[in-house]
Image (cartoon, coloured by chain):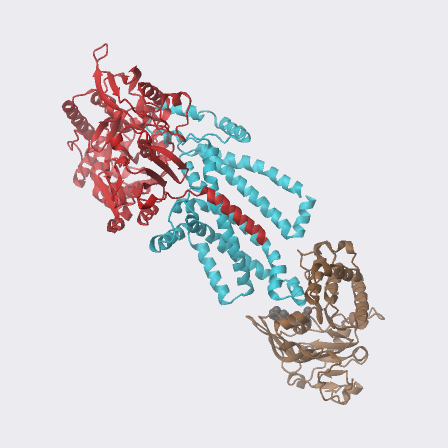
Amino acid sequence: MNQNDAVTAPSPMDSLELDIRDLRVEYRTMEGTVYALNGIDLQIPKGRTLGLVGETGAGKSTTGLAIMNLIPSPPGVIVSGSIFLGGESILKKSEKEMNLIRGNKVSMIFQDPMTSLNPVVPVVDQIMEVIEHHEKISPRESLPKALEMLEMVGIPRNRAHEYPHQFSGGMKQRVIIAIALACSPYLLIADEPTTALDVTIQAQVLDMMRELRKKYQMSMLMITHDLGIVVEICDLVAVIYDGRVVEHGTLRDIFINTRHPYTEGLFNSLPDMENPKAELKPIPGLMPDPTRIPTGCPFHPRCGYAMDICAKTRPSRYYASTEHYVECHLYDEKTVVSGGRIKQ
Amino acid sequence: MWRFVLKRVLTIIPIMLGTTFIVFSIMSFAPGDAVGMLAADASQEEKAALRQELGLDDPLLIQYARYIKNLLLGDMGISYKSGAPVTEELAARIPYTALLAVVASIITIILAIPLGVIAAIRQNTFFDTSSMVFCLLGISIPPFWLGLLLILSFGVKLKMLPVSGSGSWAHLIMPAITQSVAGLATIARVTRSSMLEVIRQDYIRTARAKGIAYNQVIRRHALKNSLLPTITVAGLQVGALLSGAVVTETVFSWPGIGRFLVSSISWRDTPCVLGCVVIFVLTFSIINLIVDILYGFVDPRIKAIYKKA
Amino acid sequence: MKKLMGVLCLLVAFAASGLFVPAPASAAGVKDTIIFAYETEPANLSTVENNAIAAYYPCFMIYSGLFKNTTDGIEKDLCTDYHIEKNAQGLETIWVFKIREGVKFSDGSDLTAKDVVATLKYAQTRPTVKSLTNWYTDVEAVDDYTVKIMTAKVFSTAPEALSNKACYILPSELIASGHDFNNKPVGSGPFKLSKWAKGDSITFVSNENYYHKDKMPKIKEVVWKIIAEGTSRSIALETGEVDFVINVDALDIPRLQENEDVVVSVTDGSMFTYLALNNAKGPFKDENLRKAISCAVNRESIIAVALENFGAPIYSSIPIIMDGWTMENATTFDLDKAREYLKTWGGDPSSLKFAIIVSTDVRRRAAEVIQSNLLEIGINCTIEQVDSATLTQVYNSGDFMSYISAYTSNDLLTWLNGVFRNTGTSSSQFRQAGLDMNGMIDSIAQTTDPTARKALVTEVNKTINAQQPFVPIYQSKVLIAYNANLEGVEIDPMGMFRLENFYWRK
Ligand SMILES: Nc1ncnc2c1ncn2[C@@H]1O[C@H](COP(=O)(O)OP(=O)(O)O)[C@@H](O)[C@H]1O
Ligand SMILES: [Mg+2]
């Protein structure tokens, strides 16, 4: 990595597993056009884990689906931008070519394990399917591999032929993880993999994912709104608001050298471990109506530091370091480094 | 599973008793009787003699009890109208209705499911819209009218198909089409909406995320899941085939049980009417049972419930 | 799944091929088959198990009797000669019939006096034909080919009565053994049953044992196809699937008449349709009211509306074909007269409340015309449509004011008995208008001299007309259509024909 010149945008390089540039996605529905992604940029270096953090509706899942090229269409439309996966442009691929990539080079774990498995197919068959497809082997050959995968995610072989309804939520998520990893992908997209699970189960699943990540040496896009998970598993963090990265940096950058008022707001809405009595300060208001995005900085109606300019122009990106950047009018090229804010 | 089936088979008995009793009562209380039809001009004594011969002068409950007793022994009685055993009368007609129903069902299923599936995965395309318009027509056209329309076009104008009777495969074509159109339309619509529901499910996305081609995802994952509502209406539709048989059989002079039932009712031929009812109830019950068993095959969650039962 | 479907289809195909009744193939282009289309299936092919018209045609083919009814009247058939003898009291109550020798049943057995005796005795025990066989008290065989029939009173129309299918001859051995004449009919008629596909068709083939060698059927195979729907029958004729349609829908007649391949036969029918009025109770007890209604009913418009003009109006109370028929005393359509009769009656027409009960669509349309006719003279009525079993029940119970019904017979006595005889049932009493109908019918029955009989019939006709027990409306035409290549077709007023005379033009 050699990105000393912070102003120059990084170019798609071999060392990046994922490189998303200025991606815009809209959902054109009868009720109006939803601007889900508004020029998002994301890069994941090989072998690293990026946490994608934001409130519900920020566009996290849309980002994941865009990488899989699985945005439901209609109503979804990729308006512009590019997605490079291991140096190859996803958006230029045909459906046939995509089918060789999905589940093989990139896999995705979806939010709700309860509904993500086919209820009428035994779980092992659902794993075998992906193996057979990508390795072009027969069911006889794929069965041992699938059983191995199940064992690896902690499900005993004798339950392999059961149906999803016979499994608990945690076990289902393990099956889904087994499906995702069955063909050893380079990139794993995990869309809130633990949101639907009990807290204890959450921990087990996260532990397992961490181990598997190490074992497979893969890159990971961890989508979550839970900062606790970010701390546990991520190297890099991208905070996304209204379909755009508003702050990006290493764990340390985001957690210690917080810049964006929105990121700050996310922390304030968490209970403080050291000082449990401290009052929670949730971010006031709701995400803007995605069909009618506020002018200027989309966060300004909810921002405690909002200035006149915030309602008028979109803030540009300021780099505190090669990896740590923020989009906010409170900073300029200099203050962003020190952390000092421009006062009104 | 077998216990479940056995239980369901046993429930046919009360259903059978109930329906035959109701129909028997209706036939008994309906104005007029077979004697009036058989010998309208006969004198009082002659009619009394005939009533006695037919057993019509016994109290109703005794008549009913006698019917049930004989039914259990496999004897469905003697037709008042023809004097022939009811079993013989039914045996001559059931095969025709069954043939028509089976062929109509095959046509229905073979066409309706692909139609519904394709319409769903091509939602809002020309194919979808036109096939749904077709289905709407299919549901709203009265079979009687459709039958005559077919007769006029393929029988009279084009002279391609025979217009009445049951002599060959060619005779079967128009009745089978008439019989199947409404069911085809209903099933296609249900399949479409259930398919639309299913293809939005998360597990379809999971399957696509594996890299499986969309068509295969539909075949392997969506089809079976979308089949439950289809099976339900298909089961009901077979029932509709039986009742629809009356109209179709009349229009095409198809010698089936539907026409027989209607003429038996107008003759107040209670044994024959009850015979038809017994056959209908049996068919319905068996179809319902098959539908329920199919549920189990399609959906392991339902099968689990059966196993517990 | 696909395999399963395939197996299923194969099974269906296999099962179906057994079901289909293949259409008879005409050998080397010579057509030797005729296909009839008729609306109802005969209930029973036995001569004595029911009296519905649908069974008449098939029975005439399979069986034969001592006499037969032809377009020219009653003819001898199995009987070669007959005379009447006096009993001990000097009354002519003993009929002696010579039976034709050398007649065989279709099963090959000989037909003798023994079979005639057994048949006539057996017919009297069968409830549905009792009213057709209660005129004789005893039957005995004098020798192998002579039979004596004893009647209680003088009975002039024994040959007519014996021409009814209920008196057609069955083999005595089979009667004794309880044979199933319905499924396996055995008779001495020109045809025999070949196959009965229930609900679909009945196939007959000519009976090689038929005695009448000159009248051997010219067409060897007859298929009697059941086509319930009127339009379907006409269409089947147009497409050539059937050759002969009985009871053509009046609506189809103009179209069929334009078709050069089809002959349409419209003959006067004897189906006598009338509006029955309850003579026994209520306002219709008064003959003036009955006459007022008869004068108000416009038969011509009923025929136009309900029958597409295929009918003839009737005013006199017996069928016009009967010897001795008269218009004397009959009322005709005349509104002024109707109002006069109403005045004589003296009641308030608007106070009348009654329903005309009907059982078919044609008669409902007729009733609708009557309804508007009656409105002209200030009478309101409603129409109630029921099925025919209900109608039978209604008139048997006497719980009615009026209904529309019909009766047909070639034979005057049968006709009078059917419509007017008081059989003790309430149904007959409601049609009597206080007349001694039984006495009149019996006196006709006992008058053997044709001239005297004709005069008597005229007298009876006048008497009934004067009382107006019911309102005669129309006699519908017999509408038949057939393939233009068919020759030898003769149709009698009941719509009956003898198809052994039919043949295909070369
Ligand atoms: N299929 C869709 N049709 C219309 N709008 C959608 C669809 N999927 C997502 N959206 C909208 O796009 C925006 C981003 O959604 P999503 O990516 O699911 O957010 P997140 O995962 O961060 O909660 C939301 O406003 C959501 O309502
Ligand atoms: Mg989401």
Question: In x, y percent, where is residue C407?
Answer: 28, 33
**Residue A311: quadrant of the picture:** bottom right
> Which residue is at the far right?
A274
Q: Is residue B82 above or below residue A177?
A: above
Question: In x, y percent, where is residue C189?
Answer: 31, 30
Q: Is residue C74 above or below residue B146?
A: above
B117 or A240, which lies in front?
A: B117
Instruction: Give the color of chain C as drawn.
Output: red
B270 or B3, which lies in front?
A: B3
In the drawing, does residue C16 fall left or right of residue A271? left
Kindly identify the residue that appears in the image at 62 percent across and 47 percent down: B293
Q: In which quadrant of the rendered image does the C terminus of chain C lie?
A: top left
Question: In x, y percent, where is residue C245?
Answer: 30, 43
**Residue B54: quadrant of the picture:** top left
- Number of marks: 0
Q: Tell me, by letter, which chain the rendering colours cyan.
A: B
**Residue B223: quadrant of the picture:** bottom right
Q: Is residue C341 visible?
A: yes
Instruction: Give the color of chain A as drawn.
Output: brown
Q: Quadrant of ligand 2?
A: bottom right
C382 or C483, which lies in front?
A: C483
Question: In x, y percent, where is residue C53?
Answer: 32, 34
> Which residue is at the far front?
C28
Q: Is residue B282 above or below residue A307?
A: above
Q: Is residue C337 above or below residue B235?
A: above
Q: Is residue A58 visible?
A: no
Kindly identify the residue that appears in the image at 16 percent across and 27 percent down: C458
In the drawing, does residue C404 fall left or right of residue A248? left
Kindly identify the residue that appears in the image at 45 percent across and 56 percent down: B138
